[in-house]
Amino acid sequence: MKKVSVCFVCLGNICRSPTAEAVMRRLVDEAGLSTQVSVDSAGTGNWHVGEAPDERAQRAGGQRGYDLASLRARQINADDFRRFDLIVAMDDANVTALHAVAPAAERDKIRLLMEFAPETAGRVVVDPYFGGAEGFEAVLDQCEAACAGLLAALRPQLLG
């Protein structure tokens, strides 16, 4: 069986991308694919490197059984494009920033998370950082739908 590695990316790696990482990890574990699918997250900026996810993201995730507490923010780098099979961005600004860092031959690995949830409204995962708790709940809703779609899209590669 094949292996696939995925890195979720947002701006600071304290809200959206660690949430997506936690959601995807649980889906992968529940599917019995943890030896085949590796998951990580990063940010395009360096403001929060080493910090735990935002407390509001941890609280919202915790209410749904996701543990984000052990995750730590880090900044994406050019080596990540060689390490990961798929770099999954939360919004168009992240895609633009990723294109600036990615080696030219690796840019085709960049995708938007919401591409994997076409039935869900919204093309991007909106940054909840400057809003209230409802924004973090919306991020979870989007991540749950899109990560399920992503795992479904990866299954043929894992079995092939």
Image (cartoon, helix red, strand yellow):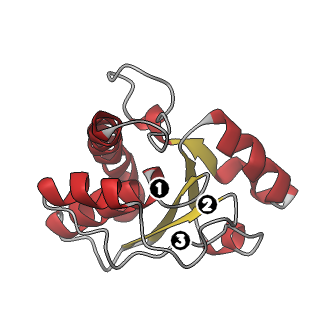
Q: Amino acid at mark 1?
A: Ser
Q: Amino acid at mark 2?
A: Gly
- Towards the viewer: 123 or 127: 127
Whether 104 is drawn above or below 132: the answer is below
Residue drawn at the location 70% of the way across and 72% of the way down: 82
Q: Earlier in the sequence, mark 2 or mark 1?
A: 1
* Cα distance in 3D space between marks 3 and 1: 9 Å
Q: Quadrant of the N terminus?
A: bottom left
Q: Residues within 10 Å of mark 3 (few under 14, many from 20)?
A: many
Residue drawn at the location 79% of the way across and 49% of the way down: 99
Disc 1 target residue: 17
Disc 2 target residue: 43
Residue drawn at the location 67% of the way across and 71% of the way down: 80
Q: Are marks 2 and 1 in contact (CB under 8 Å)?
A: yes
Q: Earlier in the sequence, mark 3 or mark 1?
A: 1
Residue drawn at the location 66% of the way across and 45% of the way down: 94
Q: Position of residue 55 (x, y in %)?
A: 34, 61
Mark yes or no: residue 24 visible: no
Exactly how many numbered labels are in the figure? 3
Which secondary structure, mark 3?
loop
Q: Quadrant of the C terminus?
A: bottom left
* Cα distance in 3D space between marks 2 and 1: 8 Å
